[in-house]
Amino acid sequence: MIELKEVLETNEMVLHENLDVRTITMGISLLDCIDSDLDRLCSNIYSKITRLARDLVAVGNEIGLEYGVPVINKRISVTPVSLIGGSACKTPEDFVKIAKTLDSAAGDTGVNFIGGYSALVQKGMTPSDRNLIESIPEALSATERVCSSVSLGSTKAGINMDAVRIMGRIVRKTAEYTGDKDSLGCAKLVVFCNPADDNPFMAGAFHGVTEADCVLNVGVSGPGVVKTALSKVRGESFEVLCETIKKTAFKITRIGQLYAKEASKRLGVPFGIVDLSLAPTPAVGDSIADIICEMGMEYAGAPGTTAALAILNDQVKKGGIMASSYVGGLSGAFIPVSEDRSMEEAAAIGALTLEKLEAMTCVCSVGLDMIAVPGDIPETTISGIIADEMAIGMINQKTTAVRIIPVIGKSAGETAEFGGLLGSARIMAVNRYGCGGFVDRGGRIPAPVHSFKN
């Protein structure tokens, strides 16, 4: 039985603590769309997406109104497009046509974003992978809703340093293609180590090849709820702190489980996973940095921040696992700088640096996320930053990612404006010493010894 106290508590979370279901993401396999003719391939892709996702937005809105917790985003993820386009696409320009098809399908279904313009090259690249990667700058500048990701490493395969080197150039080129919009294209491009096949969050979502033909994955957030809960146990022991986070995460995940099952029933699509990720927004009171401050830091980035984030991430996962048998994706805490008002403030005053953020990625859900850097940094420096983050993921057997934005024409200390959920970011200084001799070596960094667990 649901008690009146629980109903009132949930209402308070929605009205004053920014609780929401961050996304319902429909994963769609495009494997049966493959055709050697590019026009037929694009027609197959458009038809399947619009057929399966035609009611996704309406159902998401309907459930939000009925249960009182809003569904902020409705999204689609598809099979990595480099696998789908290999037969029909012989040039990067051919892949751009698929990107435009995805964008058209996303627009006609009304979703916010569509992810899966992706390649998985952690061990090596096919000609199709290479063509898709080379097409990314044009594809992201010519579309509105398409998101792209590239997997560069894994604990099992090691790190493909040839691909890391290429992606340094691709990130820079994407920034240049969208330089008139503060290099916005880079906000829709992420590189991964150990990516999850069932991640509902953009820009890294794609529909893994081991997934069913169509599934629904739900992502639930709620940093404001956790912050409010912690404010009630200020000064208490770590045991009380941990229990409070865990219990709060449990309550939030139960809402996600309810929404996932209801959406699955109404759309006739199997339920996949609930991803409980404390994903911030630029809204006041919806911040991971505020949680860290509530735990005792003057600003995010102060000594102790990494330990605080480790506690938060672990207890969120423990609470989620208690609430659902199908917790997946990236569940934990995200630290995207531009999307978190208080994180951006900490970066602006110098409390939070790129090096501190890298240390924090060892214990959070993803990695260096939505970080604006000077537009004139060398491609090799971008590759070096990516390589560092891939190494953290490979060695620690966790998902790590880089979504970095070299803002063309701007320098450290200036501000980039991305708008909406992407927010704004103070451009962070980057170590000025070079790493070209390292990233230009080529080849593959071998997998660590603990990868051989068969």
Image (cartoon, grey):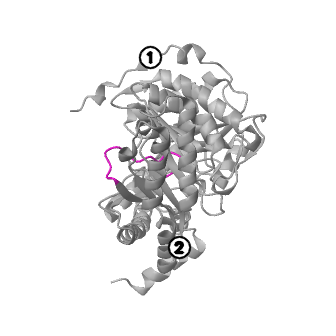
Quadrant holding the N terminus: bottom left
- The residue identified by callout 2 is 13
Give the residue type at disc 1.
Answer: Gly
| Residue 28 image offset from top left, x and y in percent | 40, 53
Residue shown at the point (42%, 60%) measured from the top left: 52
Give the SS element for disc 2: helix
Cα separation, mark 1 vs mark 2, equals 50 Å
Give the residue type at disc 2.
Answer: Met
**Residue 184 sits inside the magenta stretch:** no
Tell me if 238 is positioned left or right of 141 in this view.
Answer: left
| Residue 216 image offset from top left, x and y in percent | 39, 60
Res 283 label: none
**Residue 210 sits inside the magenta stretch:** yes
Q: Which residues are magenta?
A: 201-213
Question: Is 256 above or below relative to 125?
Answer: below
Q: Is tag 1's residue or tag 2's residue first in the polypeptide sequence?
A: 2
- The residue identified by callout 1 is 443
- Residue 265: name its quadrant: bottom left
Give the SS element for disc 1: loop
One can see residue 238 in this view: no
| Residue 19 image offset from top left, x and y in percent | 53, 68
One can see residue 276 in this view: yes
